[in-house]
Amino acid sequence: MPSCALETLPDQTELVVDDILAGGPFGYPDNDGVRFGNYEGALPEESRNYYREYTVPTPGLGHRGPLRIVTGGGTQTDPDVWYFTGDHYETFCTITDAEG
């Protein structure tokens, strides 16, 4: 899987990373921080509750849009792995520097 530096992702991504590390608040509280099922199989296979997803707002859209951060393992505020998708789970890159 390719890697991506936070600075190469949409500007809103860094704000969502900060919210994750702080434990919220999130723009879509009913959808953010919930289990991500990895039904597409694009991420490594893990246990059922390993992954969580978060919405990265897309400017100009009146809905959640296609941008997401998916984290895995660790705790909700200190995940082991960070992924970004710009196409609603079709492809991912590993965010290499989400925690500084």
Image (spheres, rainbow, N blue to C red):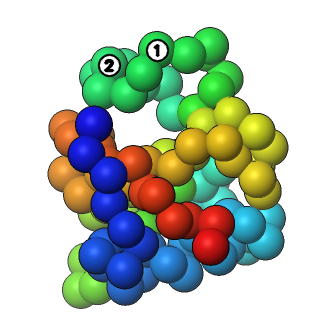
Q: What amino acid is found at the position of numbered circle 1 in the picture?
A: Glu
Say above or below: 31 vs 59.
above
Residue at left offset 55%, top offset 16%: 46
Say above or below: 28 vs 60.
above
Q: What amino acid is found at the position of numbered circle 2 in the picture?
A: Gly
Pick the quarter of the image with the N terminus. Answer: top left
Q: Which mark is residue 23?
A: none
Which residue was labeled with disc 1? 45
- State whether residue 27 appears in this view: no
Report the front residue among 64 and 11: 11
Asked if marks 1 and 2 touch (Cβ < 8 Å), the reply is yes
Pick the quarter of the image with the C terminus. Answer: bottom right
- State whether residue 94 appears in this view: yes
Report the front residue among 30 and 45: 45
Residue at left offset 66%, top offset 42%: 80
Left-right relation of 60 to 17: left
Q: Position of residue 77 (x, y in %)?
A: 78, 56
Report the front residue among 32 and 44: 44
Q: Position of residue 83 (x, y in %)?
A: 43, 48
Which residue was labeled with disc 2? 41
Q: Position of residue 62 (x, y in %)?
A: 30, 76
Quick one: SS at disc 2?
Answer: loop
Quick one: SS at disc 1?
Answer: loop
Q: Position of residue 10 (x, y in %)?
A: 31, 78
Residue at left offset 24%, top offset 86%: 60
How many labels sit on residues?
2
CA–CA distance in space, label 1 to label 2:
7 Å
